């Protein structure tokens, strides 16, 4: 069933989409780098625990690092090769973490190891969740939250709605769009596993109106025995945020400090769903993901299936970039992060790489005092007061921001910074403030 849903969440913005250059380009296999670099911290939670040693030969899909507790997932080799060294490597956050260097065999077919399949019909909920964890699957929309943890419905709660998030509202990125057009069978197989894991009563795939072709294609491929509703919603940023999508699709609001399950919902990214459907029937681990590589500075734009661990510098060399590049974003320009080091790697949460020349990159602009225009208040999708929060951040009143002004509800979409006429970097202030609040809370608990 396909319908157009005119409902939406309050506020939000409409930045230029910049999707036309890649949304019609099919997914292509990216070359294997001579050496892949795999940081063991690629997800929210405890880093993986390395189980290989230097000099060891490994096969593609082989376990390199096991899950280190419940809030953790394992790491699998994206190539067949030799573990050359295990040492600290840079990450997008600027911190160093332990990483594994694997030199790929130059003449290997790079065939993936077959594992123990997770039987859809006969596996229990717990076995499916364990299979998802063992596959190393995390949220591929960018958050990299361990998927098996998200799918575990707490005692006393129930999942009425399983929502598959095909919104992809971030400018420039077309990864999910191409996955929906090219991996429909995997998506529907993934939905079957997700239904078993969550016991959801209803399944909805949410897609923005700028991907009507994907909605039409999925409805044409939907299995007759699978009850799935496909809803097309108006284009608006940041509709891909799960709380906003729940409001648009169901007309329900997740309470402050709450989670989707508080309104009987579980939201899963469409690319994550496709990976579940692709990997679990074969008992394999994730070794690659689809990444959009685009931006004014990129010569060979496209959607590429890239081995995890591929160095960013190698990626840019392969696609070709202009000489006067100024900024490279991992993710999109709204919620992504401008990298400071090209020696970091593609990780599980990398949905896109956007490269700008010095012509398009935002120049250093003067920050003016807040003029109380209210543009940020009108833009904030969760109805915060970014102007007030920005003033409190300036005076380092972090506890008041959290306790009286719902700072921790902010999911850093960047809408406030985008519309601010005074060029105040509000989202950066809030990101720093949240980090300080979390650290204070941790220090207090430790004491």
Image (cartoon, grey):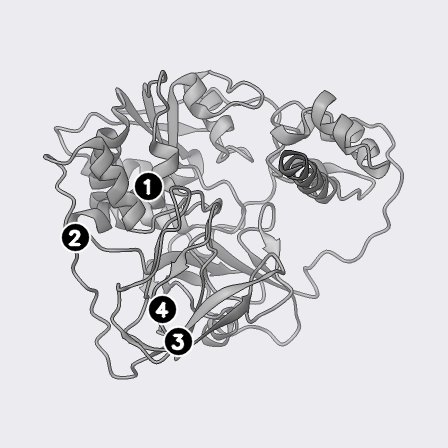
Residue 211: x %, y % from top left? 39, 40
Counting residues from the start of the chain, the first of labels 3 and 1 encountered is 3
- Relative to 115, does residue 258 appear above or below in the rendering? above
365 is higher (above) or lower (below) than 99: above
Q: Say which mark, if any, is on residue 338.
A: none
- Measured in 3D between alpha carbons, the distance from the residue under mark 3 to the one under mark 4, in whole angstroms, is 9 Å
Q: Which residue is mark 2?
A: 282
Question: Is 138 above or below relative to 285?
Answer: above
How many other residues sit within 10 Å of disc 4, few (<14), some (14-19) or many (≥20)?
Answer: some
Quickly name the residue at label 3.
33
State the residue in front, 366 or 109: 109
- Which label's residue is closer to the chain start, 2 or 3? 3
Q: Residues within 10 Å of mark 1 (few under 14, many from 20)?
A: many
Residue marked by disc 4: 30
> Could you tell me how far apart the alpha carbons at marks 2 and 4 are, in whole angstroms?
22 Å
Labels 2, 4: front one: 2
Q: Is residue 92 left or right of residue 252?
A: right
Q: In the structure shown, which secondary structural element does the residue marked by tag 3 occupy?
A: loop
Q: Quadrant of residue 391?
A: top right
Disc 3 vs disc 1: which is toward the camera?
Answer: 3
- The CA distance from mark 2 to mark 3 is 25 Å
- Judged from the image, the secondary structure of the residue bearing numbered disc 1 is helix
Quadrant of residue 17 in the image?
Answer: top right
- Tags 3 and 4 touching, CB below 8 Å: no
Q: Position of residue 373 (x, y in %)?
A: 82, 28
Residue 433: image x %, image y %? Answer: 72, 39
The disc placed on residue 214 is: 1
């Amino acid at each position: 069933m396909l319908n157009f849903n005119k409902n939406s969440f309050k506020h939000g913005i409409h930045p230029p989409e910049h999707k036309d250059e890649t949304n019609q380009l099919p997914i292509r296999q990216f070359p294997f780098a001579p050496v892949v670099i795999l940081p063991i911290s690629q997800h929210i939670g405890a880093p993986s625990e390395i189980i290989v040693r230097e000099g060891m030969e490994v096969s593609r899909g082989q376990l390199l690092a096991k899950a280190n507790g419940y809030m953790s997932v394992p790491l699998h080799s994206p190539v067949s090769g030799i573990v050359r060294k295990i040492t600290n490597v840079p990450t997008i956050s600027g911190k160093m973490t332990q990483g594994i260097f694997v030199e790929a065999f130059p003449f290997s077919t790079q065939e993936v190891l077959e594992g123990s399949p997770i039987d859809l019909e006969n596996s229990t909920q717990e076995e499916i969740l364990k299979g998802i964890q063992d596959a190393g699957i995390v949220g591929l929309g960018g958050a990299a939250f361990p998927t098996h943890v998200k799918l575990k419905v707490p005692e006393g709660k129930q999942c009425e709605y399983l929502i598959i998030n095909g919104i992809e509202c971030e400018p420039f990125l077309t990864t999910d769009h191409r996955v929906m057009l090219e991996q429909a069978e995997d998506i529907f197989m993934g939905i079957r596993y997700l239904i078993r894991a969550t016991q959801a009563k209803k399944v909805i795939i949410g897609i923005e109106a700028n991907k009507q072709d994907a909605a039409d294609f999925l409805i044409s491929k939907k299995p007759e025995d699978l009850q799935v509703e496909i809803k097309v919603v108006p284009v608006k940023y940041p509709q891909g945020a799960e709380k906003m999508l729940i409001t648009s699709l169901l007309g329900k609001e997740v309470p402050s400090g709450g989670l989707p399950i508080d309104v009987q919902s579980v939201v899963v990214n469409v690319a994550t769903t496709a990976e579940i459907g692709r990997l679990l029937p074969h008992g394999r681990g994730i070794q690659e993901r689809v990444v959009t590589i685009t931006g004014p500075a990129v010569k060979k734009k496209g959607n590429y299936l890239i081995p995890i661990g591929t160095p960013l510098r190698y990626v840019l060399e392969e696609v070709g970039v202009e000489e006067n590049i100024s900024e490279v974003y991992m993710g999109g320009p709204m919620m992504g992060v401008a990298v400071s080091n090209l020696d970091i790697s593609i990780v599980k949460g990398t949905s896109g790489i956007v490269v700008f020349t010095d012509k398009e990159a935002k120049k250093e602009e003067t920050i003016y005092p807040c003029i109380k225009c209210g543009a940020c208040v009108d833009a904030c999708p969760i109805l915060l007061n970014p102007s007030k929060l920005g003033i409190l951040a300036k005076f380092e009143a972090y506890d008041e921001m959290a306790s009286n002004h719902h700072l921790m509800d902010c999911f850093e979409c960047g809408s406030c910074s985008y519309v601010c006429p005074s060029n105040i970097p509000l989202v950066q202030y809030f990101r720093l403030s949240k980090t300080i609040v979390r650290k204070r809370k941790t220090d207090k608990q430790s004491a």
